[in-house]
Amino acid sequence: MNNQICQCVFYGLLAMLCCGCEFPADTTFKDGIIYCSEGNPDSFNPQTTTNHVTLDASAHQIYDRLIEREPYTGNYLPGLALSWQLSDDKQTLDLTLRRDVAFHTTKYFMPSRPFNADDVLFTFNRWRLKTHAFYPVAESYPHMQSYQLRKVITDIKKLSEYKVRFTFAHSNHDFLSHLASDYMSILSAEYAKALEKLDAKTQIDKLPIGTGPYLLVDYIKDEYIRFKAHSDYWQGSSTLKNLVFDITPQSSRRLAKLVTGECDVVAHPAASEMALLQEKANIALQSKAAENTAFWAFNTNKPPFDQIQVRRALAMAIDRQSIYRSIFYGTAFPAESVVASSSWGHHSGLPKLEYNPEKAAKLLAQANIPQNFSLEIWSPHIERAYAPNSLKMAELIRSDLARVGIKSTIVSYEWSTLRRKLAEQDYDTVLMGWTADLPSPDNYLQPVFSCAAKEAGINYANWCQPEFDDLINSAMQAPQNEIAQGFYHQAQSLLRQEMPVMPIAHSMSFLAKRRHVINVKFVPFSAISFKNAEKY
Amino acid sequence: MYIYLLRRLNLLVTTLFVISVFSFSLGHLFPGDPVVNFSGQQSLTFEEYDVLEKKLALDKPYMVQYFAYLERMIEGDFGFSFSSERHISDEFLRVFPATIELSVYAILVALCIGLPLGLLAGLKKNKVVDKVIFSLSTIANSVPIFWIGLLLILLFSLNLGWLPISGRLNLLYEIPAHTGFVFIDIALSDIDNKPAVYQNAFLHLILPTITLATLPTTLLIGMMRSSVISVMNSQFIKAARTKGLSYYQLIRRHVVKNAILPILPQFGLLFNTLMTSAMITEFIFSWPGVGYWLIEAIYQRDYPVIQTALLIVSAFMVFLNVLLDIIHSLLNPIVRKDIHG
């Protein structure tokens, strides 16, 4: 009797294990892609953040922009706007909008009309007008605030159902590049109105409605984000049915999942494991030029980091060579300036940053820094393109600092927590970086070091120097790139002089995927896009 | 019997009191404002803050605050998570079934493997079989569980490619969570191709279950072995033997039951190790349970979640231990006598 039960259980288990081969073909795996992403998005609205995790999860999945930029040529292509006309004095921009573009139909919203001029007005007025009902819903609009776009646009007018006119305060040729950036994703005005009636305005950034190729189904923090293909997408529905972001903060775990096939695409494969990946036949790497800068930012609001001499001495104490060797494994270029060397605004004439611990110790003593002075190094618990291993970088910096008699403590935070804590401005130093999202060189300067950026909370050195702001404003208004270049060079020399941050590296960024996944768009100045992705 | 129950309940209440006081004081000890820490709401206007402070009784003396806190805990109002901004009680109900599910499977595996092996080792005391079983279990017992987990991943997932390493189900399968127990949810869902989904869930279960079951199995083997040895040496076994019972009958009728009874109270110990190992296992295999939730909350400095998770998990452990004690005393009258004694 007992024996029979045992046999039953045994064969039952055996059957469970083995019957895989007899199932009817399961198309679930063919119709969907799992992307192992590196962290939790803080919302699903690119307007409200400069966090690339959020941009990756929203900008090109959920939304579309009025115009799109060709990644390599820099030409503009029609998006939700069919055509655009910049007036001769460059003070007005007329856009003709595309018809019959459907918004997402989801569990939480049923659109009754297609995209039109009202949506454009809502999208821009939401962050532009402080009196707008949805303005206070988000804490800040960092990109727009750091570029002061509110002052650039004086008016947006609806000329007809499908025509919109932007009016600028002064002649502006750079605005198209903003329009094509991830931050200018188009929201639904009808959805906003519905939320206002329900008194649930905050929902607009958490449960998004857009016109993009995928719609949000479900988001569980630390676990996954589930998207479904938008069946009425104006460019034709995706060949995929499902797209899932599997949130996996550890890069070793992401890599393991790629090998076992649990992920089809992974973000930021670790530089140390690149060689291993290249050996695997079924795995391919995609790379993107080094349009980013990793830096060590000093909180210039807090003594003694408000003294230039201290900041320079600390930078002098760090051996950057050992960082390149043990963290980037040859996938990065040393950074002498914060503007990446691939940009035309890069100042190549800056001397190399000096590494000289003895001199650093002397400078610190001159600045009356006591022996056994201690500081905190905050480090994000996430891999970014510019920082494949922030914690290890912090440890190297700590040992370098110990050599000049400075004690340091490393504080590691999860990414969105770190950003929240940084907003409180009570820190010493932080390992940060910037990935460019516009091709213009001022994108390395304006959103990172300007006074406006400090107000928007993305200037992690809390450094504000009117002289610097004047230089980049002059550069942006310069009629020719050659003249602008001069201003950019001066601005970079000023940064070197003042050293609010110590630039560390410009790093290549990578995406690893299984070979049967193709057409994942992974290009500079843009978040990842699965719009045309296919699996075979 | 009633006195015994009363004593156990007394123990329960005292321990819960200490735990709740600790958890309550965490709200004040964590950095930041107590109102924010207790409520979990970070962006408050001044008016909202005042209302909330009154509601949570945080403007009153500590004693009053504590009782207000206790009342909220009993009602299941734990506030909001900092990072997800959802109700902590909802989050907990989402992750808790996953932990229970994994623990139950691990316990079942441990019982199915540990008890028979322990019995065998005890019966064949000091023979080769016993030595092999005993030394294997000692090795397994002394190896850290995270290392076993990683080793299993390396072998079965990365090298052989047989088993997945994370989660409960491939994420492309969209199974709505009704109960939180994967197999029940699959049964309730209206997805096509259910056998494939079941198989996928089963494959996901193998490595975490083995990892989690290792420690309890070795403990069970040890307990069962020594218990069997002591039973085998007792007078009534000798008597039964002289009566002419066959070896097989002897074991079935007398040894198994009498050997299991004395180790029942130690099951509490088993649950304790199980719970701590479950947290580590969940983290290794990204199993979305309480442990994974708590560890992520620590990374994210999500104070309300840390506070609540500690409170609930420890209260749950205390309940379970007391419950096992009571069940044991109902089944085994000798214990009650001892305590009266």
Image (tube, coloured by chain):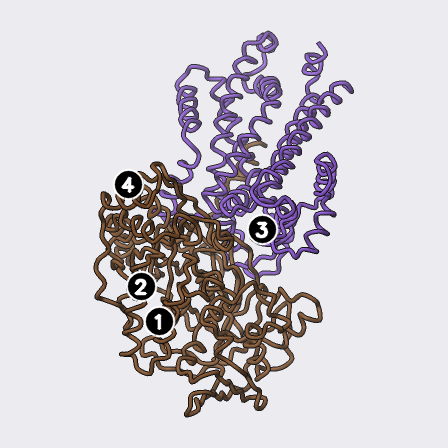
Chain colours: A brown, B purple
Residue linked to disc 3? B82
What mark, if any, has residue A494 been given in the picture? 2
Q: Which of the 4 image quarters holds residue B268? A: top right
Q: Depth-wise, is mark 4 or mark 3 nearer the camera?
A: 4
Quarter holding the N terminus of chain A? top right
**Type of amino acid at the residue the image marks with label 4:** Val
Q: Earlier in the sequence, mark 4 or mark 2?
A: 4
Residue linked to disc 1? A471
**Residue A28 at least partly seen:** no
Q: Earlier in the sequence, mark 1 or mark 2?
A: 1
Question: Chain for mark 2?
Answer: A
Q: Earlier in the sequence, mark 4 or mark 1?
A: 4
What mark, if any, has residue A404 been given in the picture? 4
Question: Chain for mark 1?
Answer: A
Question: Chain for mark 3?
Answer: B
Name the residue nearer the viewer: B237 or A93.
Answer: A93
Dot 1 alpha-carbon crowd within 10 angstroms: few under 14, some 14 to 19, many 20 or more: some
Whether marks 4 and 1 lie on the same chain:
yes
Q: Are marks 2 and 3 in contact (CB under 8 Å)?
A: no
**Type of amino acid at the residue the image marks with label 3:** Phe
Q: Depth-wise, is mark 4 or mark 1 nearer the camera?
A: 1
Q: Depth-wise, is mark 2 or mark 3 nearer the camera?
A: 2
Question: Chain for mark 4?
Answer: A
